[in-house]
Structure formats: C-alpha cells, structure tokens
Amino acid sequence: MAARGCYTRRMSGPRVYVETYGCQMNMADSEMVIGMLERAGYARTGDPAVADVILINTCSVREHAVDRVRSRAGTLAQYKSGDRKVVLGITGCMAEHLRADLRSRAPYVDLVVGPDSYRRLVDHIESARGGKPVQDTVLDIHETYEGIDPGMSPSSSVAGMVPIQRGCDKFCAFCIVPFTRGRERATPPDEVIRQVRALAKHGYREVQLLGQTVNSYVYEETGFSDLLARVAEVEGIERIRFMSPYPLGFSAQVIATMARLPKVCHHVHLPLQSASESVLSRMRRGYTFATYQKLMDDLRRAMPDIAITTDFLVGFCGETDAEYAETLAALRSIRFDNSYQFAYSERKGTLASRQMPDDIPAEVKQQRLQALIDEQRAITAQIYADQVGTQVHVLIESVSKRNPAEFLARTDTWRPVIVSGAGASVGVLLDVAITRAGPGTMYGSPVAKESVA
C-alpha cells in the first residue's frame, strides 16, 4: 500500500514529498520524518513535480513491494531533470535490506537511509543536495526516536499513531523484519504518554499503539496492560487500538484490561499465517494451532463482540495440499472479520532462504491464495449483512473519496461504515443505524437524538 502527501504547507523553504509503502509502522515513521523536516524548515507537498526532496519510505517484507518501489523510484527520477537540484531518497526497510546494491542498480537515487538512521536524515539530505550521495543503514539497538514528534497533518487529524516498540526478536523463518529493523526494544512509557498527549492536544480522538509484536511490550516494570491503562487516562483520547500483537505472550492480564477499559477497542489483528501444525513448525512461529484457538476462545469469552482479523501466508516451503486444506478449514470455522492473505516469496537472508527450498509452483500459490480470498470475502460480506438493522458507535475519520456528501467512519471493531446525513462530520463520535451492507463496507445514517420534554 502506498500513501502519499496530500497538502502543501505554505513556507518559503524547500518542499518535501514522501510516499509510503507498507505497514502502519512505516506510515508512523513517515510522519516522524516529515515532522523532523518541517521543524528544519521544509514544507510538505503532495506533488512530486514541485518537490525539492522526494523520499520513498519502503517495505521489504514481500518481493512484490520491493518490485513496486524499484519501479516507482524509476518513475519519480524523471523529476530530477532540469536545472533544479532534486534529491531522490529511499528510506526504511528496503534501504536496509538491499543496501549492498541499491544504488548500483538505481544510480539516480541520492540517498539510502535505514529505519534506525532518521535522526541524521536532515543532515544527509543537505549533503545529497550538495552533490554528495549518502548511504546510512546502520542498525542501532537503542534507537526508539524518543523525543521526536510526528508531523501533525490536517488531513488525518482523527487517528494518530505512536510506535511503542521497534524491532522484533521472533525470527520467524520467512520474515526479514528482524534483519531490517533490528532487535526488539521498547519506548519508555513516559515518552509514549507524552506523544499521546501531544496528539490529544492537536485534536486527535484515537491513538494506535504500534509495534512488530506490540503485546510483548515491557519497559522496566511496565508491561503492555499497564501501558494501556496509562494511555486510557489521557484526556481527549476516546479510542485506543494496537497493531500487531503476536499470538505468544498475549496474557490473561492484557485480555482483562481490554475488557475492562471502555476506551480500548474490541478489535485484535492476530496473525495466524497457517493452521497446519507442521507448517507452523517449519515457519518457526513458536505456537500451535491449538494454542491459537484457545487464545481466540479467551478473547471471545471476555469480549463477545470482539472482531478478530488475521494474516495468512500460503505456499510456504513444502506446503502440501493437506496442510493448505487445514488453513482453509480454519478460515471457515473461525470466521475472521477479515484477513490479509499473501503468497510466500523468498526473502534473502531469512532462515527459509538459507535452509528451505521455495518449492511450491507459482500457479499453485496463486490458486490457494485466490481460494482463501474468495472464502474470506463471503464470510466478511455475511458478517456485515448481519449488522443491518443494528446501531453502532462510530468515529468519522474522513470525507468519502467517492462522494463528498458522505463520510468514512469505523466502528469500535474496525468495520468501515459510510455515513450520510445531518450530524455527521470528521472527528465526531456518534451512533449510526446500519441500513445496508456491501461485501466490504456497511452504510448508515446518524441516529436522531430524542428530544427532552
């Protein structure tokens, strides 16, 4: 997924255009980078044609994302022509992962900066603008970007993101993240609260706490459930979400805290990847499908209305038809609210790339992937259809892209709702009556308040 700048702040200084690929952590990093550059005198722009600095903040989790970024960098290089000196930079996970040959394969790139080097980015840009290409991809086991605030974008001032943890210690066989983002380290809780308060001061209603394995957060004596409780005390923040927990370490205390605190949303994105015990073992996920099922039962027992979404990775090394069938059966029985499905692509440097052959034909991967996608679409459509005639509480996030008279909102459970009618506006929390549902979206109108005699 690519997210692009959408407004230009009028300033006399140079302009920066940032394009983001990947997960919420990448998006949060982009906002942090923009905040740093704005404080250094740069202006954000949504038009690369007028930018003095073009940055592509990247993901390298899957080969498709890497291919897209390479292609996009070549396209954006066209703005380097002419008399005006334009710096083109690649930042983030791809910069770290492909640091050895990125500039040799794309000589028009002036800047290659990994995710632990953003504090030096302003200086690096100035060096590149002076004609000196820069590569800085050193991992830092202590870097949490404490004290650096993100840019506050008027176009997205409803839900803000706060990284509370960086890196990952899980080393799943297929995953490159521990090699591109380093080992797990936590942001001090006082710093998390400072950033959440800053969001609330700027009018944000929701905060999303981010980490590669966010529920394993611990800093000295503060665990994840303690942090949730502290964030819930911040005035002005009405909703708290977190992305993405790992099935291991999801404690009973965290579940109880979620159920107890009204501000904590009843939605969990809990990656499963496969329901086959043998595939999970080859993936080095560290849990069994039975363990995952018990966690699902515990979450649903504590919060009967909870929505659970997940990730699936099909076609992993050696996956048989029978192993894949176990995953398809699990999707049908668990009935996730939604899921993100991917076909395995080998990432250089991972355990799988070193020790396991990528032996599932591409056409088989695509067939398995499409079957999962079709099944999930049907399940999601039925879940949304079952909501017709109910009332839900939503936070309106933005104006609808298709109709400026309508708004995109989300329920506590992360379900999208298109809202139209009196009383609807961006940033408002309100009750909505669901009148109809499509395969991936619900539709409704604000519930009229009863007059008081």
Image (tube, helix red, strand yellow):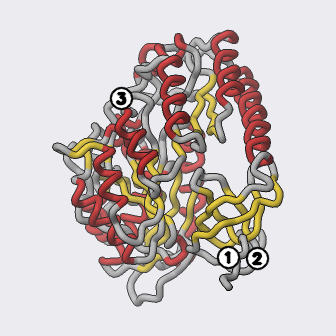
Give how far across and how far down residue 294 sits, in percent. 50, 23
* Label disc, if present, on residue 170 of the rendered structure: 3
Give how far across and how far down residue 373 sits, in percent. 73, 35
Neighbour class for label 3 at 10 Å: few (<14), some, many (≥20)?
some
Say which residue appears at 62% left-offset and 33% top-offset. Answer: 342
Say which residue appears at 81% left-offset and 52% top-offset. Answer: 438
Amino acid type of the residue tagged 1 in the rendering: Ala
Observer-side mark, 1 or 3, equals 1
Residue 225 relative to residue 8: left or right: left
Counting residues from the start of the chain, the first of labels 2 and 3 encountered is: 3
Q: Which residue is mark 1?
A: 424
Amino acid type of the residue tagged 2 in the rendering: Gly
Q: Quadrant of the C terminus?
A: bottom right
Q: Which residue is mark 2?
A: 421
Where disc 3 sits, the SS reads loop
Give how far across and how far down residue 252 sits, in percent. 38, 33
Tell me where residue 319 sits by quadrant.
Answer: top right
Say which residue appears at 36% left-offset and 70% top-offset. Answer: 235
CA distance separating discs 2 and 3 = 47 Å
